[in-house]
Image (cartoon, rainbow, N blue to C red):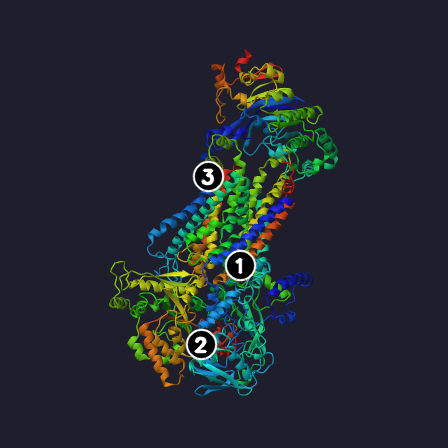
């Protein structure tokens, strides 16, 4: 078990009070597992991604824990967390295009980062160059400024950079959203390759693009309104989802390979509840076609198979 | 890069052209007849004499030919470095009078603007990372930027000059000295220079500090800063990057601010009777010496243009984006 | 990234959110309080004082008293009367000057940014030219040739030379906004350019425009003060700048008439300073990032 | 003589030198004697003055005006000085001079007057100077309307033949114009003579130019000044540094810091300041503090109704309160003008009979009455009278914007006039615009004070009545008042010697005319602004009997009226 998250609660401070972006999230991640994390925007998937590496200014760690390789991640403590970043946990951000300081040569940037981690650029460089070639970048880019690279090049550069110290957990946050279909494929494959080559142990791929996750992820976790609704092997989620929300999400999925995500979700009647003071019980019940009185109470996480969990009253029976 | 500079130079060229044209046009559209003024100053009794003088000055000032020809003459004269004769300092040529005053203004302006720039940026950067500073230094900064130059200057003279008697109250150097390459003279120059410089420096300082503070904050919130932090880079590194990038806009700001600080210098000089362009300008105004006034404006404009161009060069040197971006690099 | 906050911003509109923070931002509140306070004094004050502020109403060089709140000048003019009238005209210059500059700046900026192409080339050139010209020097030269100088004429020439940086910024903003989908949508629905600019683009940079207007205002007041100070002020009216000049010319400091010398300078500092502080406050209101500081 | 242009080089040079010295010794080289040679004026041998120069030194040419302070007096000198107390010309360069015949004037120069380049001054120089006047554009060109020829009798004696003996005008020339060295000026082209700068002037006076800069000129004492031998006169200061006028503020600061010994510019509130600053003195201890220098008058444009009506102008005169201006604006630093406009110097010429008959004083009610009698009434009830044809009128009183004391004065005048129903408002326009208006006649009311102390009231009446009225009036009769009778008298006056009985008759007649016709309304006497500091130099001219009574003034026209004696009488402070 590489990562074990227990009842994680993270809130957003706003003028109206706390928005419960993560409200008791629990899941595990095996070594070598690539987990797709999907759901509507606002469901908390990005928040979860961030929580595991760096809370931004308005986030507050309210409760729960995340244990990585047997050592707890000090989510609430930015300083303590620093020690784990890059080496243990790393991220490929949504904004790869603008992730690198525009006024610093890429090589120098890398050197700075390594020095901060007490590693010598000179020692790491050969490996770095090898990995660059792996993703089809020449050694020269190290002498370039980010603006001299194309979008795709930047994306790959960031991927190499983020995984340079072989972190055991990598969070890929909407990495493909900015790219065209062909690049998406390439990036997705690169992620898998990185895992296979052991550059990263396990990976959480945050996305709204189910079809893409389906191709690379071992497991998929679906979130709704700040909570986990279902987690199972990719194929199970796509072919035999149990939770009504997942069903709605996948439901009429005609064939794999078509981009779904938000476009499709709009067809689910109603809107997700706002998380300022969420309703008790099952949060999907307002939109749930099969909701019943029981759903007014918090549904349990029902283990369907040993690698398949769904939080719904109806899946048990 | 070449294209970048060609463009800039074009702009400066046009600016110069327009400035010269304004310079030429304004006086001729405005009331106040310089020749009549010379005559009244020569207060000549009998008509025929005044007529003789009038025609004499007429062609001395080149007012006796058609307008378009005056304009052409004006240009050709300009390139010969001939800006006409000053009425205020008759009969010295305008160029000489201005050149006399120029060093003083430069000596005031350049240190004031550069030092305030460095100090201000430092202060701003500090404020951006330190809540306490942010709440103490900045409000003061706002006040300083808001103080009318001359008012501050007057207070400084009164305090440092009259009450304490630490500093001289007027002039570029002691009236007891004649310029000479001696230590005494140099010390005296500095002594006279300090208060005017200080009042300029203080006012400019605040502006830079505020600007820098905001820029740094923005940079600290930018994507690359987030990425750095996500990868566990120490705050020192993040700040260093942010500061470096925040400097860039400040550099182009340097050029733009020049005009403003220069304005300050003009009025400050008046308060200290500091023999620079500002003081000269006031005298030119009071004696309706539009040749001199034009000459001064001319020098100022050229100076500002040069300074701007230097700023551009520096900018290109420090910011790869301008450099590469204009060589046609992607994105 | 906004995933987490989308819910609440849906619930509470941006406008009210800004207002909410504005009213809770000390910088904004204090700054505006001072500016408006002095404004009111300048607007209302004169109505309670009869006669011209330059009339010789009382004893000469009188220190502040219950009768003459700010004392009297060297000639026995009521400093308070001059002060309130001065405030009024300074606000007029600031207001009118900044308004003119603002309008020019917007028009040039929007046209350049929205039309692009040659129009942009030309306007941008124009902007840069005026930007490089040393404003005060030019103002001095121009106004030194005006025969009868008035507050209005002063405001106008100030306005005519302080617009470029607004134009520049607006142009840049427009560039980024003009390709937004809602603008394209508006285009498709056949709205005409001015409409689009006013309805679609302007609202999206309202905060920015407001702030630049404030800065212009402060700048105009300072410019006016400088002109007044070197004797290029309105020859017929009283402004804070002319007060400052008068008190200097009649060596108020030497004659220990501080009550004549201090108020005008202090008032200008207060007004402009408060404007700047308000501005920073608003900046924080409009940019949550700064708010977190 | 060094010039400011070097400063650029020097600053650079010094910076280097300075840093060099800085490394070697921090005490600096100030003990080094040659620094003094470099021109560091010893304070106790130097007189610092300001108030005379309004522009940077750039013109050492005595032919045209607008020259550096002291050029005519310290540098060049006239044949005679005018003694304002005795109202007589006293010999200066000339040892003696007199009318040897009706149309012949002969004078003898003092022996052994040397120009600063060592040349002797001879009658040739005088002849040359006079004949320069034959060039049209030379200001004293007009003497050749009545001078016929100049002959050199011997080295020191010259004779002038006249076509008409204009005594007053000739006297005016004798002390108002300086003698220039022929051997220098004959080298100049006509243009150089008219507008050349004449740097490094070759002079006959007690000082020569030491150095100058944009904001100052320094004079250094000559050791071979003729007057030391002939008149046993010795100018006390070795150096005189005259500082170009700056603002009142700055001048006051310098006075109070003891950087300036004598300020000849109007400084507001000096009266109040002197209480706290015993070291400062003025000519009189109490009001009016200053000696009168010229008469400030309200000039009506008599070419427009109803200003063309003497009765109306007299009413205005009665309506205006000079006292208000004297007290409120000047804080008692000036005196009310005599209705005749004649300066106190000329008191002896004032005809009391005429004055008591035609004189007047501030009396609003009477002014209103006078208006009514003259047929000016307010029929449309707007509070202001209309002109004789019943048309309302509104006049502007223009003064140069920025002339603070005049601005205040004009406010006071305008409100006085409004009080009696004459609709006048003050308007401050540019100094140049005022000049143009005054010269071209395109104005309604202005203030002017160009009638100043001189050897004879003739200048005053020339100023008032000069005819003909030209397109542009440059220095006289700005009212454009055409009184043939008066002008006849003025011309006769010009040709009448002061000791001639006819002289007083003419003056009485002119006084009557000026009071009846009121071409201009005298209001106050501008002072010979003079604030001196006793910190370094003492024994300034003052009313006290044990001090000199010369004008304590550095204005160019004052030296020739005895101000030069101020320098010979000064004493270093203990």
Give the vertical position of D251 relative to D132 (above or below). above
Quarter that holds the C terminus of chain A: top right
**Do discs 3 and 1 belong to a common subunit?**
no
Residue D42, picture quadrant: bottom right
**Do discs 2 and 1 belong to a common subunit?**
no
Q: Which callout, 3 or 1, points to the residue nearer the camera?
A: 1
Give the vertical position of B201 relative to A21 (above or below). below
Give the vertical position of B256 relative to D447 (above or below). above
User: Can residue D104 be seen in the rendering of this structure?
Assistant: yes
Label 2 – label 1 distance at C-alpha:
58 Å
**Do discs 3 and 2 belong to a common subunit?**
no
Residue B218, picture quadrant: top right
Q: From the viewer's perspective, tell me whether residue B192 is left or right of residue D461.
A: right
Provide the residue designation for mark 1: B69
Provide the residue designation for mark 2: D542
Q: Secondary structure at mark 2?
A: loop
- Residue at mark 3: chain: C
Q: Which callout, 2 or 1, points to the residue nearer the camera?
A: 1
Quarter that holds the N terminus of chain A: top right
Q: From the viewer's perspective, tell me whether residue D492 is left or right of residue B259.
A: left
User: Can residue D86 be seen in the rendering of this structure?
Assistant: no
Q: Which mark is residue C22?
A: 3
Q: Secondary structure at mark 3?
A: helix
Please tell me which residue is depicted at 57% across the width and 25% down the height of the picture.
A45
Label 3 environment density (alpha carbons within 10 Å; few <14, some 14–19, many ≥20): many
- Residue at mark 2: chain: D
Label 3 – label 1 distance at C-alpha:
60 Å
């Amino acid at each position: 078990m590489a990562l074990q998250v227990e009842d994680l609660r993270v809130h957003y401070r706003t003028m109206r009070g706390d928005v419960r972006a993560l409200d008791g999230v629990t899941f595990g991640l095996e070594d070598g597992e690539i987990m797709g994390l999907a759901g509507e925007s606002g469901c908390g998937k990005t928040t979860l991604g961030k929580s595991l590496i760096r809370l931004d200014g308005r986030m507050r760690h309210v409760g729960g824990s995340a244990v990585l390789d047997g050592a707890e991640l000090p989510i609430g403590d930015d300083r303590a967390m620093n020690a784990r970043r890059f080496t243990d946990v790393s991220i490929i951000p949504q904004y790869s295009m603008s992730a690198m300081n525009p006024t610093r040569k890429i090589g120098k940037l890398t050197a700075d980062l390594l020095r901060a981690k007490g590693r010598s650029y000179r020692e790491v460089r050969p490996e770095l160059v090898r990995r660059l070639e792996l993703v089809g970048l020449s050694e020269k880019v190290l002498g370039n400024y980010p603006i001299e690279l194309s979008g795709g090049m930047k994306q790959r550069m960031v991927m190499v950079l983020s995984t340079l110290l072989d972190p055991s957990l990598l969070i890929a946050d909407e990495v493909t959203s900015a790219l065209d279909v062909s690049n998406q494929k390439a990036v997705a494959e690169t992620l898998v390759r990185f895992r296979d080559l052991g550059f990263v142990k396990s990976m959480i791929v945050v996305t709204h693009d189910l079809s893409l996750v389906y191709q690379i992820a071992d497991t998929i976790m679906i979130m709704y309104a700040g909570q986990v609704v279902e987690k199972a092997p990719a194929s199970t989620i796509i072919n035999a989802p149990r939770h009504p929300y997942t069903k709605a999400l996948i439901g009429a999925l005609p064939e794999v390979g078509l981009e779904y995500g938000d476009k499709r979700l709009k067809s689910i009647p109603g809107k997700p509840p706002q998380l300022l003071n969420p309703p008790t019980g099952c949060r999907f019940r307002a939109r749930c076609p099969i909701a019943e009185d029981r759903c007014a109470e918090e549904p349990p996480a029902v283990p369907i198979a040993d690698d398949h969990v769904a939080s719904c009253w109806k899946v048990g029976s | 890069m070449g294209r970048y500079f060609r463009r800039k130079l074009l702009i400066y060229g046009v600016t110069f052209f327009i400035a010269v044209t304004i310079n030429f046009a304004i006086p001729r559209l405005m009331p106040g007849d310089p020749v009549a003024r010379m005559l009244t100053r020569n207060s000549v009794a009998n008509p025929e004499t005044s007529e003789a003088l009038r025609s004499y000055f007429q062609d001395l000032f080149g007012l006796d030919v058609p307008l378009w020809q005056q304009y052409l003459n004006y240009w050709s004269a300009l390139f010969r470095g001939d800006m006409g004769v000053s009425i205020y300092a008759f009969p010295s040529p305008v160029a000489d009078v201005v050149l006399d005053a120029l060093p003083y203004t430069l000596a005031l302006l350049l240190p004031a603007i550069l030092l305030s720039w460095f100090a201000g940026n430092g202060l701003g950067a500090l404020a951006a990372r330190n809540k306490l500073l942010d709440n103490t230094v900045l409000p003061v900064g706002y006040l300083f930027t808001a103080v009318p130059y001359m008012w501050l200057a007057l207070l400084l003279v009164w305090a440092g000059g009259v009450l304490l008697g630490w500093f001289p109250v007027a002039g570029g150097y002691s009236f007891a000295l004649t310029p000479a390459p001696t230590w005494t003279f140099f010390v005296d120059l500095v002594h006279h220079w300090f208060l005017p410089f200080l009042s300029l420096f203080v006012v400019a300082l605040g502006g830079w500090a505020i600007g820098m503070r905001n820029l740094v904050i923005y940079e600290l919130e930018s994507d690359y800063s987030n990425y750095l932090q996500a990868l566990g880079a120490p705050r020192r590194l993040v700040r260093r990057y942010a500061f470096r990038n925040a400097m860039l806009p400040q550099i182009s700001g340097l050029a733009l601010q020049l005009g403003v600080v220069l304005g300050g210098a003009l009025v400050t000089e008046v308060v200290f009777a500091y023999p620079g362009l500002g003081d000269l300008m006031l005298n030119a105004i009071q004696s309706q010496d539009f040749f001199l006034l034009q000459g001064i404006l001319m020098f100022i404009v050229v100076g500002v243009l040069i300074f701007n161009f230097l700023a551009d060069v520096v900018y290109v040197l420090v910011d790869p984006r301008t450099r590469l971006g204009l060589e046609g690099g992607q994105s | 990234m906004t995933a987490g906050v989308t819910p609440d911003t849906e619930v509470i509109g941006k406008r009210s959110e800004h207002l909410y923070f504005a009213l809770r931002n000390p910088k904004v509140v204090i700054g505006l309080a001072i500016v408006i306070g002095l404004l009111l004094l300048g607007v209302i004050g004169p109505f309670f004082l009869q006669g011209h502020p330059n009339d010789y109403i009382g004893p000469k060089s009188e220190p502040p008293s219950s009768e003459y709140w700010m004392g009297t000048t060297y000639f026995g003019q009521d400093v308070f009367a001059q002060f309130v009238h001065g405030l009024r005209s300074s606000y007029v210059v600031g207001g009118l000057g900044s308004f003119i500059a603002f309008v020019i700046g917007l028009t040039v900026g929007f046209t350049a940014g929205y039309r692009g192409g040659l129009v942009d080339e030309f306007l941008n050139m124009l902007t840069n030219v005026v930007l490089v010209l040393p404003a005060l020097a030019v103002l001095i030269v121009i106004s030194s040739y005006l025969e009868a100088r008035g507050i209005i004429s002063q405001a106008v020439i100030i306005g005519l030379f302080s617009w470029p940086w607004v134009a520049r910024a607006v142009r840049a903003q427009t560039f980024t906004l003009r390709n937004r989908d809602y603008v394209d949508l508006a285009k498709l629905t056949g709205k005409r350019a001015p409409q689009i600019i006013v309805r679609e683009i302007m609202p999206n940079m309202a905060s920015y425009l407001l702030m630049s207007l404030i800065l212009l205002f402060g700048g105009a007041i300072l410019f006016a003060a400088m002109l007044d100070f070197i004797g290029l002020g309105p020859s017929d009216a009283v402004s804070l700048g002319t007060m400052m000049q008068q008190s200097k010319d009649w060596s108020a400091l030497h004659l220990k008439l501080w009550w004549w010398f201090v108020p005008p300078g202090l008032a200008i500092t207060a007004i402009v300073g408060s404007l700047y502080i308000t501005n920073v406050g608003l900046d924080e209101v409009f940019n949550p990032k700064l708010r977190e500081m | 003589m060094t010039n400011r242009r070097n400063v650029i080089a020097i600053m650079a040079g010094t910076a280097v030198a300075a840093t060099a010295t800085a490394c070697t010794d921090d005490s600096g080289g100030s003990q080094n004697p040659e620094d003094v040679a470099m021109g560091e004026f010893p304070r106790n041998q130097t007189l610092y003055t300001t108030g005379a120069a309004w522009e940077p030194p750039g013109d050492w040419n005595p032919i045209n005006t607008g020259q550096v302070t002291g050029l005519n007096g310290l540098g060049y000198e006239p044949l005679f000085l005018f003694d304002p107390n005795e109202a007589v010309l006293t010999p200066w360069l000339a040892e003696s001079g007199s009318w040897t015949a009706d149309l012949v004037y002969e004078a003898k120069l003092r022996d052994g007057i040397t120009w600063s380049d060592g040349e002797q001054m001879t009658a040739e120089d005088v002849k040359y100077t006079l004949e320069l006047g034959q060039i049209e554009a030379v200001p004293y060109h007009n003497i050749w309307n009545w001078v016929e020829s100049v002959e050199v009798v011997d080295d020191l004696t010259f004779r002038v033949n006249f076509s008409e003996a204009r005594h007053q005008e000739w006297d005016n020339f004798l002390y108002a114009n300086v003698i220039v060295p022929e051997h220098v000026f004959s080298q100049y082209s006509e243009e150089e003579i008219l507008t050349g700068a004449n740097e490094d002037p070759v002079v006959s006076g007690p000082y020569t130019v030491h150095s100058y800069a944009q904001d100052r000129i320094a004079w250094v004492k000559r050791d071979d000044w003729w007057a030391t031998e002939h008149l046993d006169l010795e100018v006390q200061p070795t150096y005189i540094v005259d500082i170009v006028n700056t603002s009142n503020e700055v001048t006051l600061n310098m006075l109070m810091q003891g950087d300036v010994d004598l300020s000849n510019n109007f400084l507001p509130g000096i009266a109040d300041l002197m209480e706290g600053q015993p070291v400062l003195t003025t000519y009189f201890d109490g009001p009016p503090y200053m000696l009168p220098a010229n008469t400030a008058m309200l000039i009506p444009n008599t070419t427009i109704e109803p200003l063309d009506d003497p009765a109306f102008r007299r009413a205005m005169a009665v309506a205006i309160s000079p006292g208000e201006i004297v007290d409120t604006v000047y804080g008692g630093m000036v005196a009310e003008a005599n209705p005749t406009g004649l300066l106190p110097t000329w008191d002896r010429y004032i005809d009391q009979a005429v004055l008591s008959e035609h004189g007047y004083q501030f009396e609003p009610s009477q002014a209103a009455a006078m208006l009514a009698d003259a047929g000016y009434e307010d029929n449309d009830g707007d509070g202001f009278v209309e002109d004789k044809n019943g048309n309302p009128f509104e006049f502007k009183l223009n003064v140069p914007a920025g002339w603070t004391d005049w601005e205040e004065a004009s406010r006071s005048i305008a409100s006085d006039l409004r009080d009696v129903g004459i609709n006048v408002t003050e308007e401050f326009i540019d100094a140049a615009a005022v000049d143009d208006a005054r010269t071209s006649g395109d104005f309604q009311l202005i203030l002017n004070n160009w009638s100043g102390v001189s050897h004879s009231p003739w200048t005053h009446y020339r100023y008032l009545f000069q005819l003909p009225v030209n397109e542009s009036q440059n220095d006289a009769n700005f009212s454009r008042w055409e009184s043939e009778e008066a002008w006849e008298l003025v011309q006769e006056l010009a040709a009448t010697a002061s000791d001639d009985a006819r002289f007083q008759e003419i003056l009485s007649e002119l006084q009557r005319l000026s009071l009846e016709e009121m071409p201009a309304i005298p209001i106050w006497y501008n002072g010979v602004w003079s604030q001196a500091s006793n910190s370094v130099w003492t024994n300034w001219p003052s009313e006290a009997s044990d001090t000199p009574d010369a004008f304590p003034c550095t204005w160019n026209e004052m030296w020739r009226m005895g101000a030069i004696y101020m320098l010979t009488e000064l004493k270093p402070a203990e």
